[in-house]
Image (cartoon, rainbow, N blue to C red):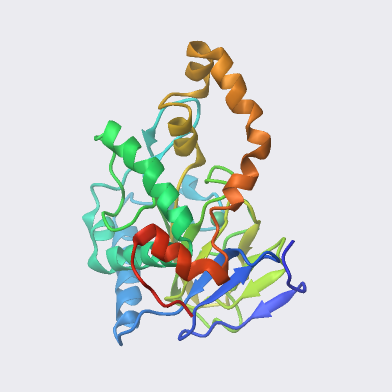
Amino acid sequence: MVSLSAPYTKVYHSSHTFVVRDNHDRILAIFAARPDGADWDECHQSALEAYDRFAATPGALSDDMFRRGEFATLSAGVSYGGGQTVRRLHCMWNFPDVLEHPSIIRLAGFANGVFANYAPKLYAYYVDTLGPLFAKLPSLKLPFANSIFTAVSFNFGPKAISWCHLDGGNVPFGLCAITSLGSFDATKGGHLYMWELGLVVEFPAGALALITSGGVHHGNTPIQPGERRASLVQYCSGGLFRYVLYGFRTAAKFMRQDRKGKKEFDAGLADRWRACLAFFSKSSELAQDLNEVFGVGIDVE
Ligand SMILES: [Fe+2]
């Protein structure tokens, strides 16, 4: 499906955004150039310092926080699962040093902007789906006011190296934003790989990637002894989208209240993947998509 020779190693250049396209020109992953400004290193380094301050809080991290690798993770935001309705994940609302840290908010907002600029139709779908949900359930709160993602995971490290995995709970056709943090030689380790694409990308501290984490297995290569890596990951639960599509109810409730409608909905799922693929912009049509979604003229390289 993807026109790349595997294994394919890509060198990250901080001054250029590059995208991964399938053989229909659809943009499936984005590796963003750093924002303009000399203070980006200062930004992601101070974000890491906020991680460290939080991790040093007695009892802040426990041994049961290891899911994707041998590192502690904490999440915040809104998710869905376990037969429940919309629920909050483990909350960090009481730790403003992390969730309200200006550098972390800036990292989150930058990821949101790259998402909107390289996948505008998908971004609009997120807004159109999540907007009514949050309007209907005003007690829900996004982790960051400047980002559409409904959940965030703070991967603390000291060696946040993810095993090869698939985020099956995420929106299957959605994008997940990963910001790399730490201090390590990115030419020797900490690469982000996407298994089915045969793609390995240098992923230095401060770099941002948006990938289809629910559709492609991914992980990191090890870093060198004595080095440090952490990450900031933003994503959306697929269950939230289903909850809205089901008419703001669970699958069970949908079936109970409207058996015929639920069966018709399920019958349409076989073709839904085509509609989902259409959310991804083709690079040749990106400027046009941006104009249609946001109504502004934007030049896209
Ligand atoms: Fe992941």
Q: Is residue 44 left or right of residue 233?
A: left
Q: Residue at x 42, y 65 (%)?
A: 290
Q: Residue at x 34, y 76 (%)?
A: 45
* Quadrant observed for ligand 1 in the rendered image: bottom right
Residue 28 locus on image (x, y percent): 59, 62
Quadrant in the picture for residue 131: top left
Count of marks, rendered view? 0
In the depicted structure, whether residue 151 falls above or below residue 287:
above
In which quadrant of the rendered image does the N terminus lie? bottom right
Residue 243 locus on image (x, y percent): 45, 31
Residue 158 visible at all: no
Quadrant in the picture for residue 87: top left
Q: Is residue 126 left or right of residue 195?
A: left
Between 32 and 283, the one nearer to me in the picture: 283
Residue 18 visible at all: yes
Residue 253 locus on image (x, y percent): 47, 17
Residue 266 locus on image (x, y percent): 62, 27
Q: Residue at x 28, y 69 (%)?
A: 103
